C-alpha cells in the first residue's frame, strides 16, 4: 500500500507533467490576450484541485497543506495566474471549514469541490487594504436578512465566482463575514462589477471592483451563525495565514521558472568566444539566484509543515511570504539581466516573470506589513522576564 508521501508525490508529479506538456507551451496566447485559460481551468477541475484541501467527508481530496503548497509551486512555475484561480477559493473553503456552522459546511463545501461553485474573497476596499479596521461596507439587519451596501476592490475571481466571502461592518461597529451567493456574471440582484482592473501582470483572470446596493443576504449565511457576529476580521486573518504560505509558494514557483530560464540561456548564449555562464559575473549571479530560491523554498515548506502540525504559523508564514516574494522579484530581475536585450522582449518568458513577481510583494499584506507582523509576534514569543 502506498504511503501518504508516495501519494502526495504522485499527485504533484501528475501536475508537474501536465504543466510541462500543456501549460508552458500555451501560456503566451492567454497572457497576451489577457484571456481566461478555460481549458486549463477545466483540467484543474478534472484533477479535483478545487477540493484539494476540503475534507474527504465533503467530497474533497483532503490533502495536507504541504502537498497543496507543492501543487501551487508547480502551477506557478507554469503560469502564476492558475494559482490565483485557486487561492481565493481555498481561503473561502478554509474559512467555512474552520468557522462555519455544521449546516454551512454541509451546504457549501460539497459544492466547492469540483470547480463549478467557485469562491472569491472580498476584504479590501478603495480606502481599506491592509488597514482592515477602515472597512466601510455596511450590513444592516432586516428581519431574517442583512442588507449590504458598499464597494469592494481587488476582488480576484469576483465575476466568475458563485460565492463571495464578504467582510462588512455591522451596526455595532464590528466586522462580520457574510457568505454571499450569486450567479457568475457582471451583475446579480444588487451586486455589480463596477470596474475591471487592468494589471501589469497576473493576467488571464479577472480582478474587479464590486459594488453592493441594497443586496440582501439571509441571516443563515452569516459565517459561524450568531456566534460569528463581529468575528469576521479574526476569521479572515486566520485564513490569510495560510494564504501567505500560498503566496510564498507562488513566489517560489515563479522564481524557479525564472532561474531555469536564466541558467539554460546562460549555457546557450555565447560572448567573447564562450558561453556566458563561464563569465564569472554571470556564474556568481546564478549562484546567488539558486541560493535565494532554495532558502525561499525551505522557509515556505517549513511554514506549511508547522501548519499541518496544527502549530501557530503567523511568524513563519510572514517570514516565508516576505523572503520568498522579495527573492522572486530579485531572481526574475537577474534572469532578465542575464538575457540582456532578449529579456526585454515578449519572445522570452522572463519578461512575464518580471511582471508577475511584484504581485507577491504587494498582495495579501505587503512586505512592510509582513515585517510589522513578524516583529510584533517576535516580541510575544520572546518576552523579557
Image: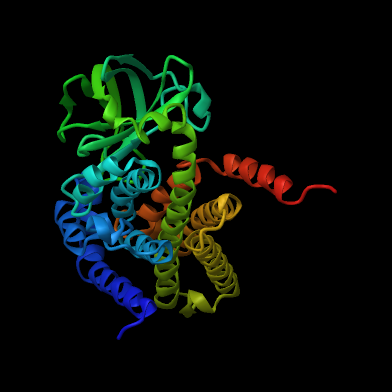
**What colouring method underlies this structural image?**
rainbow
| The furthest residue to the right | 385
Q: Position of residue 148 (x, y in %)?
A: 30, 19
Q: Position of residue 347 (x, y in %)?
A: 29, 58
For residue 339, which quarter of the picture?
bottom left
- Describe residue 30's horizontal placement relative to residue 131 as left or right: left
Q: Position of residue 175 (x, y in %)?
A: 45, 25
- Describe residue 9's horizontal placement relative to residue 18 as left or right: right
- Describe residue 345's horizontal placement relative to residue 367 as left or right: left
For residue 33, which quarter of the picture?
top left
Which residue does the image show at 35% across and 45% down from the upper left?
Answer: 201
Which residue does the image show at 15% across and 33% down from the upper left?
Answer: 183
| The furthest residue to the bottom | 1
Count of residue discs: 0
Which residue does the image show at 39% across and 55% down from the upper left?
Answer: 353
Residue 34 visible in the shown view: no
Quadrant location, the N terminus: bottom left
Picture layout, residue 163 above or below residue 249: above
Residue 36 visible in the shown view: yes
Residue toward you, 197 or 288: 197
Q: Position of residue 115 (x, y in %)?
A: 19, 51
Amino acid at each position: 500500500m502506498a504511503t501518504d508521501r508516495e501519494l502526495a508525490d504522485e499527485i504533484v508529479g501528475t501536475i508537474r507533467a501536465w504543466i510541462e506538456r500543456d501549460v508552458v507551451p500555451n501560456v503566451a496566447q492567454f497572457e497576451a490576450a489577457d484571456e481566461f485559460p478555460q481549458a486549463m481551468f477545466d483540467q484543474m477541475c478534472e484533477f479535483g484541485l478545487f477540493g484539494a484541501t476540503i475534507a474527504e467527508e465533503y467530497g474533497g481530496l483532503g490533502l495536507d497543506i504541504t502537498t497543496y503548497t507543492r501543487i501551487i509551486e508547480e502551477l506557478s512555475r507554469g503560469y502564476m495566474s492558475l494559482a490565483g484561480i485557486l487561492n481565493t477559493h481555498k481561503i473561502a473553503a478554509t474559512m467555512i471549514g474552520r468557522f462555519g456552522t455544521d449546516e454551512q459546511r454541509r451546504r457549501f463545501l460539497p459544492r466547492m469541490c469540483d470547480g463549478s461553485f467557485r469562491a472569491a474573497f472580498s476584504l479590501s476596499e478603495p480606502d481599506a487594504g491592509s488597514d482592515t479596521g477602515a472597512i466601510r461596507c455596511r450590513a444592516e439587519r432586516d428581519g431574517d436578512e442583512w442588507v449590504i451596501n458598499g464597494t469592494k476592490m481587488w476582488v480576484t475571481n469576483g465575476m466568475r465566482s458563485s460565492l463571495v466571502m464578504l467582510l462588512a461592518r455591522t451596526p455595532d461597529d464590528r466586522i462580520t463575514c457574510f457568505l454571499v451567493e450569486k450567479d457568475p456574471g457582471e451583475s446579480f440582484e444588487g451586486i455589480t462589477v463596477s470596474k475591471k482592473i487592468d494589471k501589469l501582470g497576473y493576467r488571464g483572470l479577472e480582478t474587479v471592483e464590486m459594488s453592493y446596493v441594497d443586496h440582501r443576504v439571509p441571516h443563515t449565511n452569516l459565517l459561524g451563525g450568531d456566534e460569528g457576529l463581529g468575528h469576521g476580521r479574526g476569521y479572515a486573518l486566520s485564513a490569510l495565514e495560510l494564504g501567505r504560505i500560498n503566496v510564498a509558494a507562488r513566489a517560489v514557483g515563479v522564481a524557479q521558472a525564472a532561474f531555469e530560464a536564466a541558467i539554460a540561456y546562460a549555457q546557450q548564449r555565447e560572448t567573447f568566444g564562450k558561453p556566458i555562464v563561464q563569465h564569472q559575473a554571470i556564474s556568481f549571479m546564478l549562484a546567488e539566484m539558486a541560493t535565494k530560491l532554495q532558502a525561499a523554498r525551505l522557509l515556505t515548506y517549513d511554514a506549511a509543515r508547522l501548519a499541518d502540525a496544527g502549530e501557530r504559523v503567523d511568524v513563519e508564514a510572514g517570514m516565508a511570504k516576505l523572503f520568498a516574494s522579495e527573492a522572486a522579484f530579485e531572481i526574475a530581475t537577474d534572469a532578465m539581466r542575464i538575457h540582456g536585450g532578449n529579456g526585454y522582449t515578449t519572445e522570452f518568458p522572463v519578461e512575464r516573470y518580471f511582471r508577475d513577481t511584484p504581485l507577491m510583494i504587494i498582495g495579501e499584506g505587503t512586505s512592510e506589513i509582513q515585517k510589522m507582523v513578524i516583529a510584533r509576534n517576535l516580541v510575544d514569543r520572546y518576552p523579557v522576564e
